[in-house]
Image (spheres, rainbow, N blue to C red):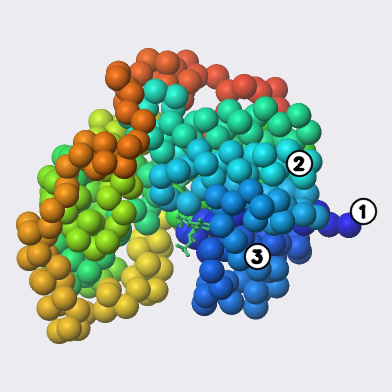
Amino acid sequence: MSTPKILVTSAAGKTGLPATLQLLDYGFPVRAFVRSYDHRAKRLEDAGAEIFVGDVYSIADMRKAMTGVQRAYQCSPTQTNTLHAGAVFTIAAKEAKLEHVVMLTQWTAAANHPSIVSRELWMNEQLLKQLPNTTLTVINVGWFAENYFMGVLETVSQLGIWPIPLGDGDEKKNAPPSNNDIAAAAVAALIDPVAHAGNTYRPTGPVLLSPNEMAAIMGKVLGRTVKYLDAPDWMVMKALISQRFPASMVAQLVIYGEEYRRGTFAIDAPNNVVRNLTGEQAENFETITRRIVAERPEAVRTIGNKLKAVWNFMKVPFTFGANPEVIERRAEHVLLKSPTLNRDSQEWVDSHDSAAGFVPDRPANAHSPALLAG
Ligand SMILES: NC(=O)c1ccc[n+]([C@@H]2O[C@H](COP(=O)([O-])OP(=O)(O)OC[C@H]3O[C@@H](n4cnc5c(N)ncnc54)[C@H](OP(=O)(O)O)[C@@H]3O)[C@@H](O)[C@H]2O)c1
């Protein structure tokens, strides 16, 4: 029997790119679904991937992308219209009779969540579970380590300020996972569906960290003092919108920030999922920070970068449009009458927190989440 071909969606993205490279290293043929042919696609092609340029919202493109493919990594782009991408993927996967799918979802995904993206990811998972001939592994990730640098790396490296609304600086509220480790968890399931079908894995970093601890690690890597600033939501929203982050995603980030401050991402973290799936210890925050700093030109301390950081900081108050409700109404997002944050949902806590009695679906399976988290 020939080696199964694997489709990776969002292949130029944070987890799709390392997942593609890791699968190629394991000797699997990979079709990498990208939005456009650029330097990232070239890198994947040079490593041996077959590049497919298309639109994940187009059923015609997805059908073509799945031709001759047996397994797939479903990773919806970080934007709204997640359900559209998921439905297109699921319809095409059914027609192509894929044997196994690994789906990336969120720790916050829930039917009644205030974030439309979290609700739609929950729906995508339910849709994939309906496929009669396809097994599923769910990668259920909390707050990525890379988020901490979103739109602020310049401010951190040039001005020594880390403005982000994470609440009390000393509370340890996340064990941030690296993109490589999230990808490695997905890859483990893609290369061995029999061992991982039906399971849900939540890769975390090795330790829970507080904002002040993370700022100290950033400072160590950058060789300067970095001070955590518990910035208000409106300020961070304005900063991201002024840097052209899509407003509808920025409105979702405000909701995830609220979950963060309430400790949703600290539940059942850290765990040993990465080590148990890959045999390697999960990457720590210093390693992740070193990689990000080495890759991004705005982290280099120059007069030009400093002036740019000051200018970007100064223009924040003059940016309009930082009202999440107005943004969501303008985008005509479905807004629930009584949504519930996961931290306030007993149903969610009971199904995610082992301290609240959560027992995984398949305790008898040697690869069950309980053992993997052990
Ligand atoms: N960040 C977090 O903390 C977090 C936590 C849990 C779950 N998640 C979930 O993770 C998923 C994102 O994963 P990721 O961060 O690995 O991906 P990502 O970096 O956001 O990459 C998404 C990729 O999709 C591409 N894309 C966008 N629109 C497209 C289209 N219409 N057709 C084809 N390709 C398109 C983008 O192309 P370009 O690069 O060319 O724009 C990008 O390369 C989301 O579903 C998010 O909800 C994120």
The 10 Å Cα crowd at callout 1, few under 14, some 14 to 19, many 20 or more, is few
* Residue ID for mark 1: 1
Q: Residue at x 76, y 63 (%)?
A: 29
Is 100 or 149 nearer to us in this picture?
100
Q: Position of residue 228 (x, y in %)?
A: 16, 54
Q: Is residue 40 left or right of residue 301?
A: right
Report the residue at 61% width, 31% height from top: 127
Q: Earlier in the sequence, mark 3 or mark 1?
A: 1
Give residue 325's mark: none
Report helix, strand or loop for mark 2. helix
Per the image, label 3 sits on a secondary structure element best described as: strand
Q: Nearer the viewer, residue 345 or 253?
A: 253
Q: Which residue is mark 3?
A: 52
Q: Residue at x 80, y 55 (%)?
A: 68
Amino acid of disc 3: Phe
Nearer the observer: mark 2 or 1; the answer is 2
Q: Nearer the viewer, mark 3 or mark 1?
A: 3
Residue 66 location in percent, x, y? 72, 52
Disc 3 + disc 2, Cβ < 8 Å: no
User: Relative to 216, is 41 on the left or the right?
Assistant: right
Label 3, label 1: how far apart the Cα atoms are: 24 Å
CB-based contact (under 8 Å), mark 2 and mark 1:
no
Q: Which residue corresponds to mark 2? A: 95
From this view, report whether residue 104 is shown above or below residue 226.
above
